[in-house]
């Protein structure tokens, strides 16, 4: 049985506590695509807020701010376009 979704309102975010954190590990996830390319993706945590709300089992609820980094690697030659000339010349 699934639990009903809890709505997070603007007021909840304004009343939330900002929580400091330190990076322990940031792993790259790797995905092999059907076209032969590999995507490497990493989520990078930017901020954490602990809401003044709890799940049914008593666990505090958190909201995160994050960004992700995506790299295409091992792209087959036939999928690559000809590189464009640099817009700026090195100094």
Image (tube, rainbow, N blue to C red):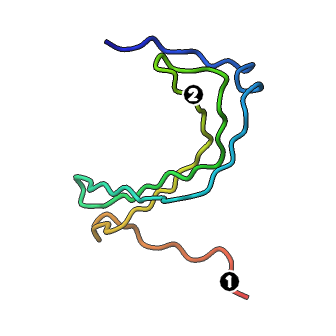
Residue wearing tag 1: 89
Q: Residue at horizontal 46%, vertical 20%?
A: 57
Lateral position of residue 23 relative to residue 40, left or right: right
Q: Nearer the viewer, residue 39 or 54?
A: 54
How crowded pointer 2 is (Cα within 10 Å; few <14, some 14-19, many 20+) is rated as few
Lateral position of residue 9 relative to residue 23, left or right: right
Residue 76: x and y in percent read: 27, 67
Q: Earlier in the sequence, mark 1 or mark 2?
A: 2
Quarter of the image containing the N terminus?
Answer: top left
Residue 25: x and y in percent read: 48, 59
The Cα–Cα distance between marks 1 and 2, rounded to whole angstroms, is: 53 Å
Quarter of the image containing the C terminus?
Answer: bottom right
Q: Nearer the viewer, residue 56 or 4?
A: 56
Q: Residue at horizontal 52%, vertical 26%?
A: 59
Write down the quadrant of residue 27 in the picture.
bottom left
On screen, 34 above or below 83?
Answer: above
Q: Nearer the viewer, residue 44 or 78?
A: 44
Q: Residue at horizontal 62%, vertical 41%?
A: 65
Lateral position of residue 72 relative to residue 19, left or right: left
Total labels drawn: 2
Residue wearing tag 2: 60
Q: Residue at horizontal 68%, vertical 86%?
A: 90
Lateral position of residue 14 relative to residue 32, left or right: right
Of circles 1 and 2, the one toward us is: 2
Residue 46: x and y in percent read: 64, 49
């Amino acid at each position: 049985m699934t639990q009903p979704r809890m709505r997070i309102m603007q007021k909840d975010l304004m009343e939330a506590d900002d929580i400091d954190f330190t990076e322990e590990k940031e792993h790259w996830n790797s995905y092999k695509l059907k076209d032969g390319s590999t995507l490497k993706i990493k989520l990078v945590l930017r901020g954490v807020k602990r809401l003044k709300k709890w799940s049914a089992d008593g666990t505090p609820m958190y909201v995160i701010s994050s960004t992700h980094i995506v790299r295409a690697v091992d792209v087959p030659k036939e999928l690559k376009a000809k590189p464009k000339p640099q817009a700026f010349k090195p100094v």
